[in-house]
Image: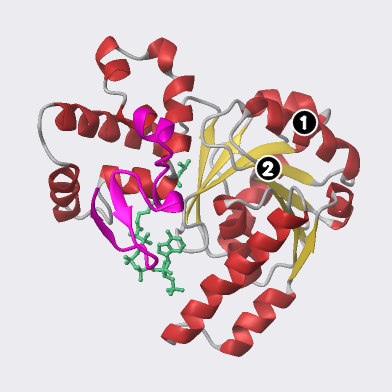
């Protein structure tokens, strides 16, 4: 596959088995995306409780698709059979590509990358699903920067087609070629970004969210703002999207940009206030909106 800026004759690395480490909302969605595309996945949770919760949540999501008639039971069974659960990162020795989706905290991710650098085979690609952390720092922690890159999925990762691949300072060209080809193989629309603030998507969307926060300050309701954006053809308004992505993630991203933010941006701290009140969005049932069991939103 031709990737702009790369020699056309690069041979992508062989990816037969993938691994995912960290099984929160994003990790689960990534496991589902891979297994649905026919890729065997080693899914590593932090501990048995996390692994059990993730396995249950994945089965529940596919079961509801089966109940709705959008997925055949046999296909669900085949997907589940492609997932091997584990709580031991050493099991990732069998993977050719590992996607890290642990919590969005540089220290936590550095520790995981140091472990991955030790336990995986030479040549295994180590990709971070980070939204805004510095992949070059993670690359350094792994001890094998040439194999490290970003693969940033979008929530819900088993549904959203966009995949933002990130080329870090020392990422080997054949790693870039591999993740672009692999993205297509799993039915995604891969785009390539460099390491920069917000990559492409969050860089653009953060400006839209910023204006939405200012509008709330100036008296518009969250529902009115979202309705306008929806009417312009976007699948979701900026505030509903914040609830979907997780207000804790948005708050952490805001914190990472605080030094460059204007006083007005810092003052419009709705997201921080909601996080402090335990309102993290869809995952806690409350954010800008209140959510019922079926994710139906009502004003909060
Ligand atoms: N979690 C899991 N699955 C979900 C979901 C959720 N929150 N919301 C929807 N789905 C699933 C449904 O179960 C359904 O699956 P099925 O077809 O197997 O039954 C499928 O998605 C389609 O859902 P709907 O039938 O409700 O269809 P919609 O047309 O309403 O689509 C949507 C829902 C795909 C979420 C759509 O509204 C959309 O594209 N929204 C924009 C999402 C987006 O931009 N995400 C990016 C967030 S930012 C991010 O992740 C980056 C990070 O760095 C912060």
Residue at left offset 47%, top offset 79%: 65
Instruction: Using the rendered view, name the quadrant where residue 138 is placed.
Output: top right
Examine the rendering and report whether any part of residue 259 can be seen: yes
Front residue (pair 206, 171): 206
Does the beta carbon of the residue at mark 1 sit less than 8 Å from ligand 1? no
Q: Is residue 282 magenta?
A: yes
Q: Which residue is mark 2?
A: 127
Task: Tell whether 171 sits left or right of 166.
Answer: right
**Highlighted magenta segment, given as a residue range:** 273-300
Q: Cβ of disc 2 within 8 Å of ligand 1?
A: no
Q: Is residue 248 left or right of residue 288?
A: right
Eyeballing the image, is 66 above or below 53? below
Q: Who is closer to the viewer here, 234 or 220? A: 220
Q: Closer to the camera, 50 or 173?
A: 50
Secondary structure beneath dot 2 equals strand
User: Residue 88 in magenta?
Assistant: no
Residue 59 image position (x, y, % from top left): 60, 73
Q: CA distance from mark 2 to mark 1?
A: 14 Å
Give how far across and how far down residue 239 sits, in percent.
28, 43
Give coordinates of residue 41: x percent, y percent. 74, 63
* Image: 97 above or below 206: below
- Assign the N terminus to one quadrant of the image: bottom right
Residue positioned 37% across, 68% down in the render: 294
Cβ atoms under marks 2 and 1 closer than 8 Å:
no
Residue under numbered circle 1: 111
Colour scheme of the rendered structure:
secondary structure
Q: Residue at image x 33%, y 37%?
A: 205
Question: Sequence-wise, which precedes: disc 2 or disc 1?
Answer: 1
């Amino acid at each position: 596959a031709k990737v702009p800026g790369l020699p056309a004759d690069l041979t992508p690395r062989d990816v037969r088995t993938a691994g995912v480490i960290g099984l929160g909302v994003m990790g689960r969605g990534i496991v589902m995306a891979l297994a649905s595309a026919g890729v065997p996945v080693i899914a590593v949770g932090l501990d048995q409780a996390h692994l059990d919760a993730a396995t249950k949540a994945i089965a529940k999501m596919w079961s509801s698709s089966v109940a709705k008639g959008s997925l055949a039971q046999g296909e669900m069974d085949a997907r589940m059979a492609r997932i091997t659960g584990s709580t031991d990162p050493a099991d990732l020795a069998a993977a050719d590509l590992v996607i890290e989706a642990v919590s969005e905290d540089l220290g936590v991710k550095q520790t995981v990358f140091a472990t991955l650098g030790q336990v995986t085979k030479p040549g295994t690609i180590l990709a971070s699903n980070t939204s805004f952390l510095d992949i070059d720092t993670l690359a350094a922690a792994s001890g094998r920067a040439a194999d490290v890159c970003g693969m940033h999925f979008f929530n819900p990762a088993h549904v959203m087609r966009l995949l933002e691949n990130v080329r870090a300072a020392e990422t080997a060209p054949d790693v870039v070629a591999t993740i672009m080809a692999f993205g297509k193989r799993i039915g995604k629309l891969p785009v390539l970004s460099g390491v920069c603030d917000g990559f492409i998507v969050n860089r653009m969307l953060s400006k839209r969210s910023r204006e939405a926060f200012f509008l709330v300050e100036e008296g518009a309701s969250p529902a009115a703002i979202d309705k306008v954006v929806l009417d312009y053809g976007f699948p979701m308004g900026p505030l509903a999207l914040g609830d979907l992505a997780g207000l804790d993630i948005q708050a952490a991203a805001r914190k990472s940009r605080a030094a460059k933010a204007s006083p007005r941006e810092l003052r419009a701290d709705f997201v921080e206030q909601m996080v402090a009140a335990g309102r993290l969005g869809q995952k806690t049932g409350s954010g800008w909106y209140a959510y019922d069991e079926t994710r139906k939103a009502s004003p909060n």
